[in-house]
Amino acid sequence: MIKSLDQKLKNIRANPSSREFIIADAKDADMAFGVRAPGPRHYLASKGMRAAQFSPEVWTREEYGHRNLPEFLDIIRDVTKQGIVDIMLMSASVTEKLAIKEGLFKDSRVTPAARANDTTDIWAIRNGTYVKEPSRPFRSATIDHIQCGKIECDRTTGEFPGANLGLYSATFTNRLDEDMATLRAFKEFREEAERKKFRYFLEVFDPNVSSGIPPEKLGEFINDQIIRSLAGVTESGRPSFLKIVYHGPRFMEELAQYDSNLVVGILGGSAGTTYDAFKLIHDAQKYGARVALFGRKINNAEHQLGFIEMLRLITDGRVTPEDAVRAYHDLLGKMRITPKLSLEKDLETTDSAMSYGGGSGTVRVTGAGRKPSSSKVRTGGTKPTSGTPTTSPEEKPDFTKMDAVQRATYHRDRLNRKYG
């Protein structure tokens, strides 16, 4: 089966003005957070609760608050079967469970990927202080283990049961010794990846410690680091695409226009409000991004499948971020799910922490701290907005005859039918 990622990358490079957009669900947080990685238990997969052992004199299952690994795997299965994301990013151990042993991605258009390295600035374990130290390169996983689950793969066929795409992360701190060590490790990885025909995408974090660079200049530093670091890398060793912090329109356009073959993506950062996520993906796409990798923003959502579908509707240009928030809250109401924030609060933007440690590197999307303009889209009930063409679930409406409010209402009602 042709993977949607491969088709979209081909189309984007053939036509830089294409509206194709790649969405990845980053479910690799066990490489960073440990026990808390599966996220809060307010959302469970279609299979529901998985058995767990808790001594009543210590705490109850409800008091514990976090999903266990089986519940986390169930959500990955649900998201993959939904088929809206293009990439499912996981740790090597989860890749082995779901891709190699279970064959989850065999007949799916979703591409499995694994985190190929775990630099020290993502070691966000409880009571640890590693994220406060300058980032150092480190790799737990090997390419062979990601591809086939063992120390050495059979390379006679070129087919691998695991993942043949990895995330490689680099954090530059503006400190000579640390950044040279980061580049040496990156060079070693690239050479091994090329020999083993392993594809990767490159994540470049903002400095995780004080760098002496003013916050408003970080976009310049990161853009120049990326172009300088890849200038000595020929096509066979280059990343499939990039994953960076969104520093705003000017820096995104500066990087995206530099080389049309360099596909630029953004990372999501901490959960924030729903509008944070929807506005971020909308603005980044508007100014040149063609990929978004959202981890905590998806994993902490009240309803992950509905949240992901709204992301796709936004990147397809079918709804605005504001209308998507209202439609999402309407869906939660229909499913009797209590939102974490009121609609009014969820329509605000906040500063989002972009580092795993949460203490360094923040981004504020356009309009932060302000509420978006009001819309006619309703937040409850099932009666269509006046003037909205009525359709049965089987009918395909003519979107060219709808305005933005009518399209948003149609998709809101469709989601209610689908998930309600």
Image: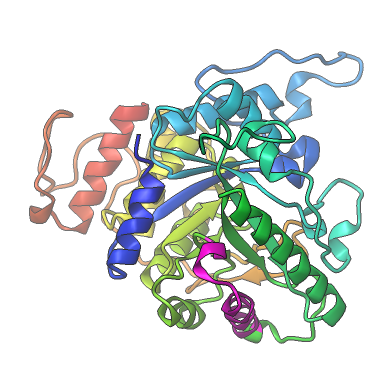
In this view, 165 is above or below 100: below
Q: Does the magenta stretch include residue 228?
A: yes
Residue at 41% over, 80% down: 257
> x, y percentage for residue 236?
52, 63
In this view, 26 is above or below 218: above
Q: In this view, does 266 lie to the left or right of 66?
A: left
Residue at 64% over, 79% down: 225
- Can residue 65 be seen here? yes
- Nearest to the observer: residue 285 or residue 155: 155
Q: What stretch is highlighted in magenta?
A: 218-239
Q: Is residue 361 left or right of residue 307?
A: right
Q: Which quadrant of the view contains residue 81? A: top left
Image quadrant occupied by the N terminus: top left
- Nearest to the observer: residue 305 or residue 150: 150
Q: In this view, does 19 lie to the left or right of 234?
A: left
In this view, 59 is above or below 410: above
> x, y percentage for residue 128?
91, 51
The scheme the figure's colours follow is rainbow
Image quadrant occupied by the C terminus: top left
- Can residue 326 be seen here? no
Q: In this view, does 6 lie to the left or right of 316?
A: right
In this view, 340 is above or below 258: above
> x, y percentage for residue 86?
43, 45
Residue at 91% over, 15% down: 57
- Nearest to the observer: residue 360 or residue 343: 360
Q: How many marks?
A: 0
Q: Is residue 243 magenta?
A: no
- Nearest to the observer: residue 335 or residue 48: 48
Q: Which quadrant of the view contains residue 153? A: top right
Overall secondary structure of the magenta section? helix
> x, y percentage for residue 343?
46, 50
